[in-house]
Amino acid sequence: MGIAENILDLVLRLTSFGTLLCALLLYLRRGCGDQSRVLLMLVCAVTGLMFLLRIMGENYELLQRAVLPASNLKGGLLLILFYLLYPIEVIRPGWLDFKRALVLFSPWILLEVLFACVPDFRPLTSFPELIQHAGEFNVWMRLLVLALIPFINFILFYIPHSWARSSADNRWIRWYTCGSCGIAVLYTLFMLTGSAAVSAVHVAYCLLFGLVVTYQELFLRMRVPVEAAEEETEEELPQAAPAAQETTAPALDTSPTSGCNPASAAAKKPAAPLCLTQPNPLWNALMRLMDEEELWRNPDLKLETLAVRLDSNRTTLAQMIRQHGYEDYRHFINRHRIGEFLKIAENDPRISIQDTFFRVGFRSKNTALRYFHKETGTTPSDYLLRLPKRK
């Protein structure tokens, strides 16, 4: 074997071990997540077993020495569709029932039927040979299917997405779609070239992507609270805790004229926003919008969206937010979220930290914990432990 073949053999073995390890970790932590974690575990397990059986097979062969083989095309399409089960469940928990799954896998079913009707496919050994016979039905038909595979991932943008009942925000959807498109593009290049080097890059990328997704699932992504997942058709965010609206415990105050801070003596008090002496109509309108509609609960809220709502522009709004003592727009929004968290915690110190972070608008554990420590100087667990218990 050449250098490329040796690298491919090593990468295949590492990928088999790595994906099975991811499946094991997800299995051990399955009780801490939701159905999406189980689906990701199955994807990792199937991928790892597929590579393991290939490596341990008696007729183990790294490459078929062919371009655009029909068997690989069907298997590749099936795996890519299978990989979409996890992000769909993250974007819309419980949405993918049997009928929708059947529609999702319909391209693979149609391809199986089509290949059954055309049993004989011209074997192709090189890209120039593929170009030479591209006019034949059994060749251009395979090329058409191959060209469509990368675009299948964009179905994630058309899954009904409600930020109130999903732990995925728009940024996560874009990130996952781009990552899965990378897998499809490398797969396409391998199918067109049959190159061991391209195959090694493709398999290594799959392993890296799987490790990153598993890490995000276990340590970064917030699970959907049970009551939010059970919502049927409402688009409004369910109330985090009804009693929290009635409490008189002060939250992290973001009004332009207040000098008050959240009132837990057990933690460091967040610094109050800068108080300006002259009234600012745009700032007052922004604060009314924040207080009345609680837009900060929306993890997909953008500075541009607020500027349009206020008949202003991005630059003016960002400058005004900085003038009122905030580092940037994100600091302004996340300070509202931490303030609501503290208000709920003052009312009931026994709250679920993760569920409450989810309700106030966070979708990343790291972001929530970073801003919480920045505003209070402590961790959520320590903060809650130091609060007086209420009966």
Image (spheres, rainbow, N blue to C red):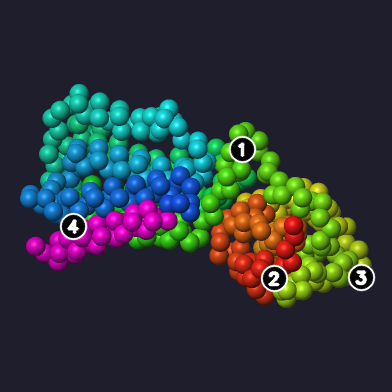
Which is nearer the N-term, disc 4 or disc 1? 4
Quote the CA–CA distance across marks 3 and 2: 36 Å
**Which residue is the site of mark 4?**
196
**Residue sitting at x 24%, y 26%:** 114
Mark 4 or mark 2: which comes first in sequence?
4
Label 3 sits on residue = 277
Q: Amino acid at mark 3?
A: Thr
Q: Residue at x 40, y 33 (%)?
A: 101
Local crowd size for mark 1, using a 10 Å CA cut-off: few (<14), some (14–19), many (≥20): some
Q: Which residue is mark 1?
A: 231
Within 10 Å of disc 2 (Cα), the crowding (few <14, some 14-19, many 20+) is few
The C terminus: image quadrant:
bottom right
Nearest to N terminus: mark 2 or mark 1: 1
* Res 72 → quadrant: top left
Q: Nearer the viewer, residue 24 or 203?
A: 24
Q: Is residue 190 visible?
A: no
**Earlier sequence position, callout 4 versus callout 3:** 4
Which is the main secondary structure of the residues drawn in magenta? helix
Question: In percent of the image, x 61 and y 37: which residue is there?
Answer: 231
* Horizontal side of residue 71 vs 306, given as left or right: left
Q: Is residue 233 above or below residue 205?
A: above
Q: Which residue is depicted at the point 17% across and 37% down?
A: 133
- Residue at label 2? 386
